[in-house]
Amino acid sequence: MPIFSEENAFMMKNWDNVKEILDADKRLRKQLTEFLLSLEVDLKKATWWQDKWIFGRMSDSEVFISKSKWKVTDDQYAICIGIESFIPENLFGNESAATLYVWGQKNQSQLVEKLREKFKTEIEVDSGELDDKGRGTYVIKRSLNQCLPEEIDNFEDFMRKQIINHFSQYAHITNKYNRLILSNIK
């Protein structure tokens, strides 16, 4: 009885190709991080950016924006607008899609709830975006549209447009509630 499965035997026989694929995956992940970081340049061109917004990086697969006045600790903000899980599995595969969000710190639960209520009653929010379960710290949570294989040549424009539109839309909306946010920051 062989000790290796048929799939593992195939991999071992084709190790040079497997190594190339693994190396390409590492390079792709690095390029996706670079793409996320490049969004800062586009965001800084927006007229709303001048109102003391900041660009932050939570990890290689997550970036966010917030306002400098919403800072609650050295590296945390009460409310953030961002994208998370921007990794190959979530962009091209069958895994859950990357997530666009408006999010609040755990200790800002009252503020998060007030924003949910404002968004629910005063803003037209797409069905399924409002995280109104009342648990957790997301105000808005929606899936980024994945890139189909036939759309790879347009990946950068396709993704950039979705992400920039999300950041811009919710920068305008949350800015409308700046006083509410500032008065409720703990």
Image (spheres, rainbow, N blue to C red):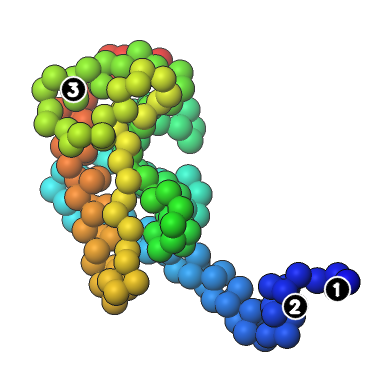
- Rate crowding at label 1 as few (under 14), some (14 to 19) or many (20 or more) other CA atoms within 10 Å: few
| Residue at far front of view | 1
Q: Is residue 2 left or right of residue 9?
A: right
Asked whether disc 1 touches disc 3, contact meaning CB atoms under 8 Å apart, the reply is: no
Which of the two residues, 52 or 166, is positioned nearer the viewer here?
Answer: 166
Amino acid carrying label 1: it is: Pro
Q: Which mark is residue 2?
A: 1
Task: Measuring from the top left, give residue 107's x and y in whole percent.
Answer: 45, 18
Which of the two residues, 103 or 179, is positioned nearer the viewer here?
Answer: 103
- Rate crowding at label 3 as few (under 14), some (14 to 19) or many (20 or more) other CA atoms within 10 Å: some
* Residue at image point 18% right, 22% down: 120
Q: Nearer the viewer, mark 2 or mark 1?
A: 1
Q: Quadrant of residue 117?
A: top left
Q: Label 3 belongs to which residue?
A: 120
Q: Secondary structure at mark 3?
A: helix
Amino acid carrying label 3: it is: Lys
